[in-house]
Amino acid sequence: MDSIISVSYLALFLIISLGLVVGKAKIRGFSLDISAVIFIAMLLGHFGFRLPSEYQYIGLLLFIFTIGIQSGPGFFRSFRQYGKQLFIIASIIIASGALITWLLSSLMNIDKALAVGLFNGAMTSTPGLAAAVEVSNSPMASIGYGIAYPFGVIGVVLFVSLIPKILRINFKKSEEEFNLSVKQSYPEFIPGNFRVENPNIDGKSLVDLKFRTATNCVISRVKHDGVTITPSRDTVLHHGDVVRALGTAEDLENVKLFVGPQTEEELQLDKGHDVQWVLVTSKQVINKPLQKLNLGANYDATVVRIRRSGIEIRPMHYTMLRFGDRLMVATSRESMKQVVRLLGNDDKRLSETDFLPITLGIVIGILVGMVKIPVFGLFDFSLGITGGVLAAALVLSGIGKTGPIIWSMSSNANQLFRELGLLMFLATVGCEAGGHIEETFINYGAGLIAAGAAITIIPLIIALIVGRYFLKMNFLTLMGVMTGGMTSTPGLAAINTQSDSGIAQVSYAAVYPLALVLMIIFSNILFKLPVF
């Protein structure tokens, strides 16, 4: 038994090592990178190499969980911004795949259970296969899955690797376009100095003026009688004062109307006042709104900016603080020490790895994936293990904190676990797929393989045309949606080797749970449809 375990360990690391070596090779600037592992695994799998299935599940769980934790906040933001487009592309991929399967099964007189298996293999959907086996009650579904799965894996990887070359896509440009769209949705905050000349606000305090509500801006400095201070809510404005407001360009126009003309006059803070960025790392303040911290009343402090995941958020009284937020705070030097102590400001906390959120999050995800929900009495729906873990990770990272547990990971730890999980997953599924190649050709011929290839490639082409030329989607976002719609983890890995921006990961995570649901639904529909 020990020798078998040792051999499996040896085989795992041998495949990964060979794959990484091959992946570094470049031909005319093109390389497979980490995706080469699956091709080496398939080659060795053809010659009898096998790995325990536990490696596949452990690897997949680590990979999916880390994607969910990293993409959670971006997932909900992306779904709000692109929800309709994501739904359209995912539906096109899966519905067209089901339609092509139905047409080919009718034309080629393919057994229904075998056809549903082909559909799920071509879409690389294990939860869909489980639904297919259950609804058909036939081993033919598993055989069809085995026939179509190898090309389903390879086809998506090749498609997302070659299409950018064929279309001459500039990934840097796609990243810039995405960042520009984010800036348009979340405009940059800029400062502006204004002289108080409106007689209606002379002698009134900021709280009486309801300045933030009236202008959507925050005042970070006030100059009165030659002395510049950081204001509190009770600071009174007088004619001739100069205030520094922070907001979008549009908001600053409101300040000009409300206060008076813009000025280039400098506002140097008095030695007793300070403005600095403070990092939120204290568990006591995470998931609490700014209003509850009462920084103004307790410390005469004003939160001027909030930066989260590279995006500036308008500081409002209801804004919930998240672990890793950076707050620009204006207050006195003495009070700043207390604010820093309250918020944490511990850079080391960002690089620490707490294993409890990882292990507990995966356990919660597995339990969520095991829940079965009856759908109109026709079939039972469940997210499956991977779908449950992804859904749990997205929700938990969106929540941010539960009691003492902070649902986050340092970027270094996330990258390490993600790549380790991906390597284990690719090596295992590659060996299994490679073992079916020869058997598939001998027993079923090229016809079913060609059918499976068509079910894989045609929906991708349709989705590419609709997403790029009709919906005008960002290319990296579209690639992430397409791999998510195909539930293709290796496909996402192939995109990640071409761009490290994380844009594709967010859209992949956004559409993956939807794709799982649609695959299960269409598997049931496909089996019940009569052939023509």
Image (cartoon, grey):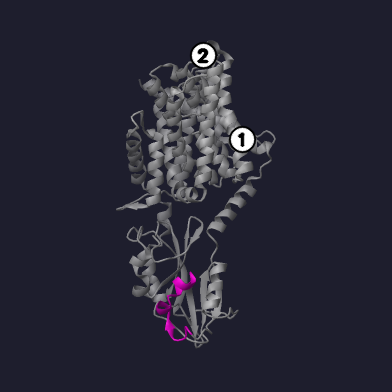
Looking at the picture, which amino acid does disc 2 mark?
Glu
Can residue 169 be seen in the rendering of this structure?
Answer: yes
Lower position in the chain sequence, tag 2 or tag 1: 1
Residue 412 in the image: x percent, y percent? 47, 47
Badge 1: residue crowd in 10 Å (few <14, some 14–19, many ≥20): many
Residue 256 in the image: x percent, y percent? 55, 76
What residue did someone put label 1 on? 161
Q: Is residue 471 left or right of residue 489?
A: right
Q: Answer above or below: position of 109 versus 52.
A: above
Please give the count of numbered marks on the rendered protein: 2
Q: Where are the magenta residues, as a range? A: 200-218
Q: Is residue 323 left or right of residue 88?
A: left
Along the line of sight, the residue nearer the viewer: 340 or 438: 438
Along the line of sight, the residue nearer the viewer: 157 or 112: 112
Q: Answer above or below: position of 504 versus 278.
A: above
Task: Verify whether residue 531 appears in magenta.
Answer: no
Tell me the CA gap for discs 2 and 1: 28 Å
Residue 74 in the image: x percent, y percent? 47, 50
Q: Residue furthest top?
A: 442
Badge 2: residue crowd in 10 Å (few <14, some 14–19, many ≥20): some
What residue did someone put label 2 on? 439
Q: Residue furthest left?
A: 403
* Residue at image point 49% right, 20% down: 115
In the image, which disc is placed on residue 31?
none
Residue 8 in the image: x percent, y percent? 43, 24
Looking at the picture, which amino acid does disc 1 mark?
Ser
| SS type, badge 1 | helix
| SS type, badge 2 | helix
Can residue 32 be seen in the rendering of this structure?
Answer: no
Q: Is residue 471 left or right of residue 142?
A: right
